[in-house]
Amino acid sequence: MKGVLGQVNETQSTEKSDEEIIKILKENTNIAVVGCSRTEGKPAHEIPKFLKSKGYRVIPVNPFADEILGEKTYLSLEEVEEKIDVVEIFRPSEEAYEIVEEALETDAKVIWMQLGIKNEEAKKLAEENGLEVIQDKCMKIEYKRLVGD
């Protein structure tokens, strides 16, 4: 019986409940957006724009732009000079591990991988270092679904 329980515990999902996602959305206001786009219409532009309209501090991270959404853009997380609560990833899944490694050098508390972005190794690294992780979910969709318009 003990082995079965241990086995169940080891395989339990670490997906966040709606209550946990609401807490993350309400308590973390500074969002570094890795892969933030300057191109209107792209999700990597429109979602940060939506978040900014809801009062979040959006910190664009994009080595190919000086300014996005009226905000100074940083080349990397390492260069960000202000507090980061959430690192939102808009990069291919295979880049997530390296981004998490960089995020560990900041004061980030949450890694959020956008819809379609999933990397179990990156998730494990973040969780082993005390960060909360959400993957394969859209921050805008979750905000509208759980917090409201």
Image (spheres, rainbow, N blue to C red):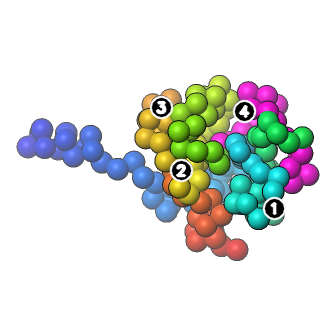
Residue located beneath label 1 in the image = 40
Cα distance in 3D space between marks 3 and 1: 33 Å
Looking at the figure, which quarter contains the C terminus? bottom right
Residue 19 position in % (x across, y down):
50, 61
| Residue in the picture at 43% in, 41% down | 120
> In the image, is residue 42 part of the stretch drawn in magenta?
no
Q: Earlier in the sequence, mark 2 or mark 1?
A: 1
Graded by Cα atoms within 10 Å as few (under 14), some (14 to 19) or many (20 or more), the crowding at tag 3 reads some
Q: Name the element at disc 3.
A: helix
| Residue in the picture at 86% in, 42% down | 65
Cα distance in 3D space between marks 2 and 3: 16 Å
Residue located beneath label 4 in the image = 77
Residue located beneath label 3 in the image = 125
Between label 2 and label 3, give the one nearer the viewer.
2
Graded by Cα atoms within 10 Å as few (under 14), some (14 to 19) or many (20 or more), the crowding at tag 2 reads many
Q: Earlier in the sequence, mark 4 or mark 1?
A: 1
Vertical side of 125 occupied by 118: above or below: below
Q: Tell whether label 3 touches label 4 (CB within 8 Å).
A: no
